[in-house]
Each structure stands twice: as structure tokens, then as C-alpha cells.
Amino acid sequence: MKKILIPILLLLIVTTNSCNLYKHYERPDISFVDSLYNKIPMANSYESIARMTWRELFADTLLQGCIELGLKNNTNLEIARLKVEQAEATLQTSKLAFFPSVSFSAQMNVGEKNTYTLLPSMSWEIDAFGRMQNSKKGAQAALGATEAYEQAVQTHLIATIADSYYTLLMLDEQLDISKRTLKTWEENIRTLSALKRAGKTNEAAVLQAKASKANVEGSILTLEKQIIEQENSLSALLGIVPQEFVRGTLENQNFPDTLLTGLPLSSLINRPDVRQAEYKLVEAYYATNVARSYFYPNITLSGNGGWSGVMGSIDNPGDWIYNIVAGLVQPIFNQGKNKARLKISESQRQEALLNFKQTLLDAGTEANNALVSWQTARKRLDSDKLQIMYLKGAVFNTQLLMKNGQATYIEVLSAQKNLLQAELTESNDKYIEIQSVITLYHALGGGLE
């Protein structure tokens, strides 16, 4: 019995002494990202968009229905979910490596005496130098990276569906503006025709008005084509056949009046692509530990036990046999391969570190640009409203002056064209404002339930 306990005690001593061979992963210094926000004014009273769910941000129930349908049907998201299942299976495999392997063998010899041997055996690798432990932590990090990838796909899908939906609303509004303008041109043509009959204008004015009307009709056809194409694109995102969508209006969309990224660094860390990059760094860190463990021996505890005897014998059912062995294997001519393995893993860890830092920089830049775009779009909308108000007054006055012979048709046409362009610009700036909100929400890791 002492012969059995001695190797076990030795293995326990080695295992205990090897617990401090490796350090746990520690996040590198990433405070440099805060410098991206130096030029962005912030106030504590702002509402943090990073803490809102997509249902809270996108209050349009028709859009919510589209997002729910996309989350259910989108093939890219389903593939990402399958990748998570694969990573979970890999992690389970790494956990099972800590358990002993058990096998069973049976042997029969036929002769003067028919003898038999029944021999269950067990082999258990002792993780004395942390190879299996580091492999398990690496598998946990790989699972985390895959889960972050799934969220990244989901976040991108939600943002893309929302952007497609609001693009449709913008095109709807521009189509409505163009149709209203078309009616105005039809009225202008009637007015100019009457003035021509009264001798107050000429045929050139009527023809110019008709040309402007034809230009607007062409724009309407283009917008109708773009709307159909956008509906088809949205249908593909939702995994359904092309169809028309019931939707709201751009004017009735409401978003927070103030937006804030929160603490810049903490907000960026919530981004799924940033978390995925860090999990990749963690995985590479523990892979380096695994590579380092190959410089140490493998220690295996193996044993077998069973019985043997003569078949058919009642008096002698068999003799018990057992054997327990502690084995230590250290490759002698494998140092070159081990050094190469370690060098490769350390290089991959440095690559993962650089990728993590670059992902943070890109995320900060994206959030910075989205916030500036949102602020600029809001200021532009204020200017757009003033411009439209002045141009409506100009159109009214030039029409009145032309009827009284105090203005030319060219002045009326110019005022009408400027108003049309200003109204189209306003609808585009509304869309840019909403698009900036979507981009900022995406940039801060939104898209969660």
C-alpha cells in the first residue's frame, strides 16, 4: 500500500508547487481612448444612449415588428448562434480533459486449462504544470469571443434594419414633397397660360414652366424606383419575399433631445466587437501559457485492476490483480519544436494585443464621428426650417408680383426651384440626424434586448 501512496503524494507535491507558474490575464492600459473625446462637449444632465435597449430607442412599433422579424429569420445571425454552440462544445471538451479515461479489456486463453483475465484500466493525466487549466481558460475566452461575435451580428442587423426603414421614410417624404411641387407647377402652368392670353407674358414662360414640371415628374419616377428597391433590400434583411411595408412618417419619429456616450472608455468596452477583440487577446494569452507548459514533463497516473482465473471453476473464482503506476514523460529531443511553438504563440498574442487596441481606436473614432454628425445635423435642421420659411414667403411674393406685372416668370421659377431643393434638403438632414443616432447607438454597443 505504501508503494501506491508514494507516487500519489509526489504528484500532489509537484502539483502544489506548480500553481504559481502562470499569471492570470490582466487587461492592458487602454486609457488612451479617452483622448478621442476631448473636443466633444458633455454635460451630466445628458441622457446616456448606451444604456437604452433598441425597443426604447426605436419607439416606432412598425419598425419594432421589422426588427423582431429580422432577428427571427436572418441567416447570418443564425450562423452566429451555431458558432456559439460549437464554442460551447469545445469548452465542454476542455473540461472533460480533467477527468480520468477508463477502458476495459478481456482476454481468454484456450488450452489444457481455459483461463480468463478481466482487466478494467484507468489513466489520469495530472495537470501539474497548468496545460489543461490554461487550455480550459483559452476555450472559455473563445466562447466569450463567439458570444460577442453573435451580439455584434445582432447589433449590426438591428442598426441596418433601422437604417433601411428610415431610408424608406425619407424617400416617402421626398416623394410627397415632389408630388406637392408637381401640383404647384401645374397651377403655375395654368396661371402663365392665362397671363399669356392676357398678353402679360409669353410662350417662353409657359414652356419653361412645363419643362420644370417634366423635371419633377422624372424625379418622382426615380423616387418610386428607389422606394421599391429599398423595400426589396429590407425584405432580404428580414428573410422574407419582396413586399411593400406599412410604415410611419419621418416627421413623427421621436428621439432623445440630448445624447451622451457616458464615460467614453466604459461605453466602448461594451461594444461587441471590442469585447470580441479582447476575448481573442485573452485566448492568445492562455495559448502562450499552454505553449510554455510544453517545456515541462507530462505526469500521468495510471492503474488497472481486475481478476483472473480458470473458466468453469467453482472453487476458484479468480485472483484479484491490481497495479498503480505514476508516470513522468519529458521529451528529450523536442526543445526546438517547443521553442518554435512558444515563439509563434507569443507573436500571436502581440498581434491580438495590437488588434484589440486598434479596435478600441476605431470604435472611439466611430462614436466620435457619429456624435459630431448628430450635433451638426440638428444645427442644420434649424437652418433648414428658417430657409424654408423665407423661401415660402419669396414664392408667395413673386407669384403675387408676377400677376401684377411687377416680376418676371424667371423669378417665380427660381423661387419655386429653391423651395423644392430646400425641402428635399431638410428631409435628407432629418434622415442624417436619425442615421447619426443609429450609428452612435451601434458604436456604443447597442442592440440588446
Image: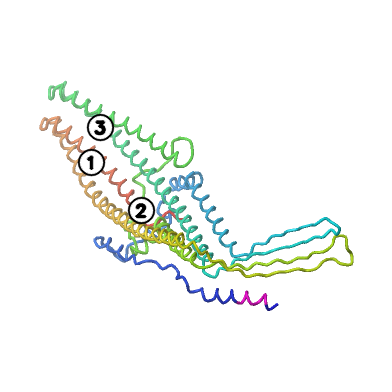
Q: Quadrant of the N terminus?
A: bottom right
> Which residues lie in the magenta part?
3-9
Label drawn at residue 184: 3
Comparing 300 with 384, the one in front is: 300
Q: Secondary structure at mark 1?
A: helix
Q: Is residue 202 left or right of residue 328?
A: left
| Residue that mark 2 sits on | 255
Q: Is residue 398 left or right of residue 235?
A: left
| Residue that mark 1 sits on | 422
Residue at left offset 48%, top offset 35%: 241
Q: Say which amino acid is labelled 1.
A: Ala
Mark closer to the chain start, 3 or 1? 3
Q: Position of residue 51 (x, y in %)?
A: 40, 60
Which corner quadrant of the image does residue 215 belong to? top left
Q: CA distance from mark 2 to mark 3?
A: 33 Å
Front position among marks 3 and 1: 1
Q: Secondary structure at mark 2?
A: loop
Which corner quadrant of the image does residue 112 belong to? bottom right
Q: Say which amino acid is labelled 3.
A: Thr
Q: Is residue 372 left or right of residue 113?
A: left
Can residue 307 be seen here?
Answer: yes
Q: Is residue 408 magenta?
A: no
Can residue 51 be seen here?
Answer: no
Q: Position of residue 436 (x, y in %)?
A: 32, 51
Comparing 438 with 122, the one in front is: 122
Mark closer to the chain start, 2 or 3? 3
Residue at left offset 84%, top offset 58%: 114
Q: Residue furthest bottom?
A: 2
Q: CA distance from mark 3 to mark 1?
A: 15 Å
Q: Main secondary structure of the magenta part?
A: helix
